[in-house]
Amino acid sequence: MANETQDASQATVNGDNAQSLCDVVRGLPSRAVVDLWSTGVCTRCILRLFGIREHDYYRSSLSRSILSSVVGDSEKHLVDSNVREPVVCRVCLGILQFTYSVDNKLVVERESASELAVSISDLLRQQGFQIDSFSLEVSIPPIIQENDRIAWLYMKRKFESELWFQGKSLSECISAKDALKISLTEILETMLGCKSSISSFHIRLTYTHRIASITVDSSNEGCKRRKTGSGNGLDRINDDIKCSGFLTSEADAVVERSFVSLQANESPVCLKLPLEQSSEPCCLEFLCYRTQIYVGGRYLKYSRNVSQSCWIIDDERMGEASVEEILGSNVLPICRGDNYKFHAAGREDIDVRMLGSGRPFLLEIQNARLVPSDDSVKSLEIAINNLENKLVGVKNLKLVDSQSWDLMREGEAEKQKQYVALVWISRPLKDEDLHFISSLKDTHIQQRTPIRVLHRRSPLEREKIIHWMRIEKIVGSSQYFLLHLCTQAGTYIKEFVHGDLGRTQPSIGSILSCRAEILRLDVTDVKMDCFLTE
């Protein structure tokens, strides 16, 4: 035993000198340490119950020999004869022993935090993520927190009269979640070559256990004594204590009220919470993911047979392509994401071209393995604009943050749009028509939901503003002309020209006192600040 003790005090575990760990354990009350060990509490849980935060202690491979080397002679025989590191800790259920099951079947045992970190980093690399920072998230079952409270209450009832316990509080304990983060973070930083911080990339460890929660048996006539296993103090925590009839998942204040009641020597209040020995560790699920990234810009649509988004009616595709698919299929591969969502500031009909400065849009890339550089985004813009079919183009393509979504939505309702329409009227155009149309400023019109969209839009009446208009003659034609106009967002331009059987008032037809038809329409400008050239 002497050789084993010497080896333990001299050993280097995972690159850390175990002597520092021996020193900190030696500073703890040995009787309490051995008592917790004997009830099936693992060494790391003992450290956190005593409020030890230093990461080196949680990273090291903690063994029975280390404990045996530092406890007093009066307790050493207990360590040598009775105490062994539990297969599954009764408090953390294996989480801080780095023991877990996969799909509730295969049990995996890791010697240290380093081995668990290797599994995480291997998964990250297998999935092809490139990262410059990460955020470590841990989710543990509620039963672990309840076990902490039980263990603390047990320590309080057994050792509160001893000097070392004076002034201690439950809030000084380190949670199992924080202890696991302490043990893993620095190792992961080294393995992954980047720092832990607030990041769009998340490493999430989700622990679950079949024991979802613990309820408290309530009885107005008191509680029965319960003895299980070896009959240690944790199993008898209910002895001679009356039940209060509430759930243990309530706030810490419930436990604190119990402590106050005990200290005041009033009728004690405690919970009927036997801390059962479990041979079943928690089930662990690893998940590496990146929150959405956004690529924004302005798109142009040169074809009158391309919809903005994929448009299928009765299993038949409308149009030869869509802006959404063309842009998404080119952006997604360079980000190596799982999927994408397309968002735009309004839309135009399939037979309407989008020209001029283009329409603002965002591509939301889900779980991107790579965040593209500015240079690669600029190269992507050039590649899209040089596509052979020339259906769609982009301007000012760039990687943007989530605030751009809010800016695009805020500006959408207030934006103005400019159009040019090819119009035919039933009589020859006169010079006074040109002057009269040009003189109209901020004309208010009333538009009932157009007949062509009544099947998918609510039957409402909307007031819109035509800010200005002008007519451009077409050489050699007296009944065809180009109508340039600037309108409030949401104006139905086609209906403003032909009147929609009187559902839009006034209209170009009513203003010119003739029949008017629109033959072609282009959007020439969407007046919004987002994604303009800086």
Image: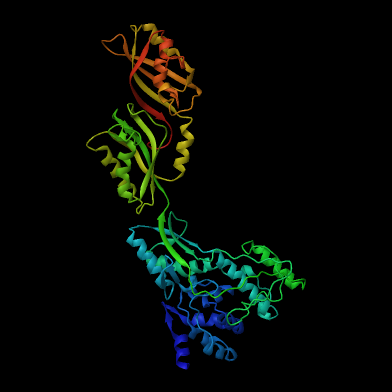
Q: Quadrant of residue 189?
A: bottom left
**What's the residue at 40%, 72% (across, down)?**
115
Residue drawn at the location 32% of the way across and 45% of the way down: 331
Quarter of the image where the C terminus is located = top left
Q: Which scheme is used to colour this image of the protein?
A: rainbow
Q: Is residue 150 left or right of residue 137?
A: right
Marks counted in the figure total 0
Q: Position of residue 322 (x, y in %)?
A: 31, 35
- Residue 226 at x, y percent in the picture: 64, 76
Q: Position of residue 128 (x, y in %)?
A: 33, 58
Is residue 27 visible in the rendered image? The answer is no
Question: Residue 434 or 244: which is nearer the viewer?
Answer: 244
Residue 219 coordinates in the image, percent (x, y):
71, 66
Identify whether 430 is placed above or below 109: above
Q: Is residue 178 left or right of 12 when viewed as pictured?
A: right
Q: Is residue 506 above or below residue 488?
A: above
Residue at 28% x, 10% y is 477
